[in-house]
Image: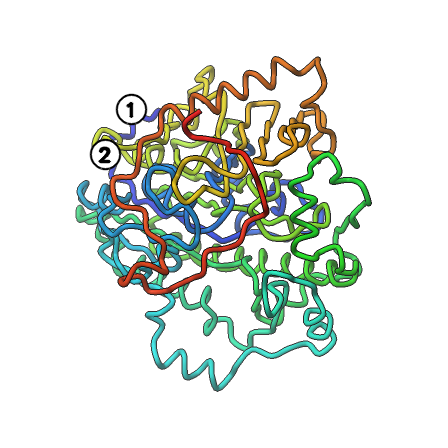
Amino acid sequence: MTLAEHQTTPWNVLAITSDEHNAKMLGCAGHPVVRTPNLDRLASEGTRFTKAYCAQPICAPTRQTFITGLYSFEHGQYGNGYVFDKRHPTWAHHFGRCGYTTGCIGKMHTNNEDYHYGFDVRVSRSMISDEIKARREQHPPTDDPHDKALFDAVTDNWGKPPRLRARIARDGDLEPDGVMTNEAIAFLRRHGPAGRKGGAPFFLHASLSQPHWPWVLPEAFYYMYDPSTIDYVPYRPGELDHNAFALRRRRAFGWEANTDEQNRLARARYCGAVSWLDHNVGRLLDTLDALGLAEHTLVVYFTDHGDMASEKGLWLKSLLYESSARVPLIMRMPGVIAPGAVNETLVNHADLFPTLAALAGTGDRLPERISGLDLSRCITDGTDGVEGPRFTIAFDGVYRDGSGCAQLMARSGQFKLIQYDVDDPGQRDVLYDLEDDPDETRNLADDPAYAEVVREHEAAFAAFFAKLRPPLFPVRLAQDDPQADRKPAVGRRLPAAGRLSSRR
């Protein structure tokens, strides 16, 4: 069925998101160790995208990008320490206007976390019932004594206690992802059957928090992977010499002091968290099946950003390597999106809102102010020969005045150019040929043979910034906003000089 042929059918939409999921860590992506049977099933029944990227490899700004179709330069939540203005239109407003019952269960990271932002139903972590909190206090997570000693000794210069740590959950239903999965299932049971009976279809954003640290996992998932046999490549001295920004980050956090034993343990528990996430995704898919909704529901799975997960001696996000900036993306829409297919279209978080709207038949009612691209014709059956974008852009470290950023990436079909805001012009550009060098080990930026490639990607930067519009509402730090529900300190960033400017 083509996109035009299915437009008269009211499709439900289930958007399942995770937090910090390295796109390589999927069974269907060929990972040799991680077990993700439910996401693998979703990929076999839908299409997996191999070139999907976050807009910004840090939680809050990239999350607001995919719910608005705007980049953080435009929606104003430049980083985790900023507030997402309550007046912003979101995909909830759009689908609500189109007759959908809408819900967001789990993390939004707006720093107005309990505000609905257009959703009919909103459940956040602060809304967890007193009963569940009391039960968890009676049955708190426990430590593996051997693991605790290793985790406590992890060096993390910017986090106390260290962020790399894990605990054993006595009851997964009392942990945030268990609670939010149960709430999402309740939403599906309450609102799902209505669409089949001629009532309102639903748009549900089920937002899970694993495999974000710390990893609090049911015992079966905590011990699922043996640290001694986990896939792990130790840091090789000199491998970051061509990427001074990443090398400085490794040193600034103190990760060079961590042992292979600590890294193996943390990587094993991270993999356990991926499988725990997969388990909860499976529960949502099983609920669609049980309610007879699967054939009428567009399901999309993706994450906010990845995690280096010990690769290159690095952890966490906020880097533009593939493990941090690329995201897993799977879409299933029976009869419309090809089952078992692999799609190499360049996709950005900003593109998801307009693309899902078009797939669901509401693309003609999108808000005027949107920067993401409708890529639906690159996804549906019978679209051979439809070309997607030549470049997609990601960035991080947006300056407080919105005039530029600390790092910037242009990804094309074959290459990735990263530009850093550093003093030394010789360390500013990093170019990778991802077809020939998927592990990003060789910088080609200074090779005269690739000078034209560098220029083309720099032109993509200029075109990107030329299209950006200023935020509609004042940009505010959470610590300065009396309505914000948290007051995070503005995070430190690595020292830099010069500007990667949005006014270039």
Where is residue 67? Give x, y as percent: 34, 44
Q: Nearer the viewer, residue 476 or 58?
A: 476
- Identify which residue is drawn at 60% across, 19% down: 454
Give the label on residue 369, or none.
none
Q: Considering only vertical position in the picture, is 423 above or below 172?
A: above
Where is residue 484? Give x, y as percent: 31, 61
Q: Which residue is mark 1?
A: 4
Q: Considering only vertical position in the picture, is 255 above or below 29?
A: below
Closer to the camera: disc 1 or disc 2? Answer: 2
- Identify which residue is drawn at 50% across, 41% down: 396
**Residue 28 placement: quadrant:** top right
> How busy is the neighbourhood of tag 2: few (under 14 within 10 Å), some, or many (20 plus)?
some
| Cα gap from disc 1 to disc 2, whole angstroms | 21 Å
Give the label on residue 367, or none.
2
> Left of 483 or right of it: where is 263?
right
Labels 1 and 2: the sequence-earlier one: 1
Query: The disc labelled 2 sits on which kind of residue?
Result: Pro
Query: The disc labelled 1 sits on which kind of residue?
Result: Ala
> How busy is the neighbourhood of tag 1: few (under 14 within 10 Å), some, or many (20 plus)?
few
Where is residue 36? Give x, y as percent: 59, 52
- Identify which residue is drawn at 29% across, 30% down: 6
Q: Nearer the viewer, residue 61 or 204?
A: 61
